[in-house]
Image (spheres, rainbow, N blue to C red):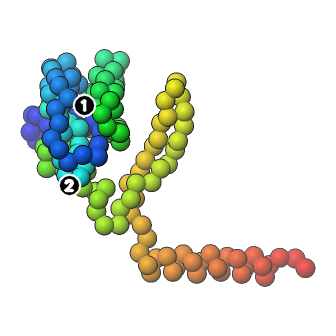
Amino acid sequence: MPDEGKYLYGIIATDEARNFGPIGIGGRGDEVGTIAYRDLSAVVSNSPMTRYVLGKENLLAHERVIERVMKEFTVLPVRFCTVAANAEEIRRLVGKVEQRGYTLIPLDLHYGKGRIKLQLALAKGKLKHDKRASEREKEWQREKSRLLRPR
């Protein structure tokens, strides 16, 4: 396992290389930049391959990077302490969004302290034969409830 990895802050809609300055997590002054994959980019900084302590200093550093990027882009934030081994792994993660059959699904939307929080999931849709089976099952359940209804 390598000693250095890439800390992932979020995903933005741009294909150009960007540098947001030496504001990376961990207090080392790592440069925060982008790794592009087609028309999306991951916002990353170099980071040791370690699990960060869920403390005030690290959470604020993560938030500062997100807020700095939000001045120019809409950010799809990534969970705290997401560290990938290298740039290729980051591209693979970002590429999942664009793969055939995958889509982003909103799970939860809530408001708090003047902010809107949206929880998303990456999901793959049903294949055509799976949809037909589900439709038959729904149809059977409707028919069964109609037949079992008291008269």
Which one is in front, 135 or 77?
77
> Is disc 2 surrounded by few (<14), some (14 to 19) or many (20+) residues within 10 Å?
few
| Residue topped by disc 2 | 38
Mark closer to the chain start, 1 or 2:
2
Q: CA distance from mark 1 to mark 2?
A: 29 Å
Q: Residue furthest right?
A: 151
Residue 44 visible, this angle: yes
| Residue topped by disc 1 | 51
Position in image of residue 6 (x %, y %): 17, 37
Which one is in front, 60 or 148?
60
93 vs 111: above or below: below
> Is disc 1 surrounded by few (<14), some (14 to 19) or many (20+) residues within 10 Å?
few
Position in image of residue 92 (x %, y %): 20, 53
Task: Please name the residue shown 31% across and 67% down the image.
Answer: 100
Task: Please name the residue shown 42% across and 67% down the image.
Answer: 125
Q: Secondary structure at mark 1?
A: loop
Q: Is residue 81 left or right of residue 21?
A: right
Position in image of residue 32 (x %, y %): 18, 30
Q: Is residue 106 left or right of residue 44?
A: right
Quarter of the image that includes the C terminus: bottom right
Q: Which mark is residue 112?
A: none
Q: Secondary structure at mark 2?
A: loop
For the residue marked with disc 1, what is the amino acid? Arg
Q: Is residue 89 left or right of residue 110?
A: left
Q: Quadrant of residue 10?
A: top left
> Of the residues tagged 1 and 2, which is closer to the observer?
2
Which one is in front, 146 or 61?
61
For the residue marked with disc 2, what is the amino acid? Arg
